[in-house]
Amino acid sequence: MAEENQVKLHGIWASPYVKRVEMVLKFKAIPCEYVEEDLRNKSQLLLQYNPVHKKVSVLIHNGKPIAE
């Protein structure tokens, strides 16, 4: 059951867009795994989930990405 509702957020600490998503997830009491990205050395997961723009923030729910 927990694997069905898995939520991950890829972002950087200084992004107001990432902070906005974090605040909403906390407000709605949705557990989330936060993945800090290094924009100079982007991870393969970030490039896989947002291949067009290659930017953060990316919210992943059950393996389906929602970019920016």
Image (cartoon, helix red, strand yellow):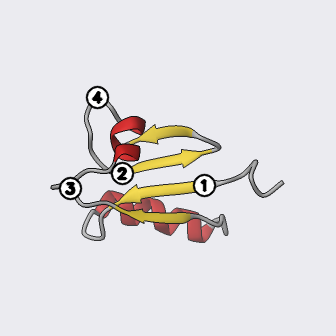
Q: Nearer the viewer, residue 35 or 25?
A: 35
Query: Disc 3 or 2, which lies upstream in sequence?
Result: 3
Counting from the top left corner in percent of width and height, residue 13 is at 30, 70
Residue at the disc numbered 4 = 52
Q: Which mark is residue 39?
A: 3
In the picture of the structure, the residue carrying the numbered disc 1 is 7
Label 2 belongs to which residue?
A: 57
Mark 3 or mark 1, which is nearer to you?
3
Q: Amino acid at mark 4?
A: Val
Number of other residues with Cα within 10 Å of mark 1, as a class: few under 14, some 14 to 19, many 20 or more: many
Amino acid at circle 1: Val
Q: Earlier in the sequence, mark 2 or mark 4?
A: 4
Name the residue type under label 2: Ser
| Quadrant housing the C terminus | top left
Q: In the displayed structure, does residue 6 sit left or right of residue 36?
A: right
Q: Give the image location of residue 45, x and y in percent.
A: 41, 45
- Sequence-first tag of 1 and 4: 1
Q: Please tell me which of labels 3 and 1 falls first in the chain.
A: 1
How far, Cα to Cα, is label 3 from label 1?
A: 21 Å
Mark 1–mark 4 Cα distance, whole angstroms, equals 21 Å
Q: Which of the pair 53/45 is nearer the observer?
A: 45
| Residue at (53, 56) in percent of width and height | 8
From the image, state whether disc 2 or disc 4 is nearer to you.
4
Q: CA distance from mark 1 to mark 2?
A: 13 Å
Which quarter of the picture shows residue 51?
top left
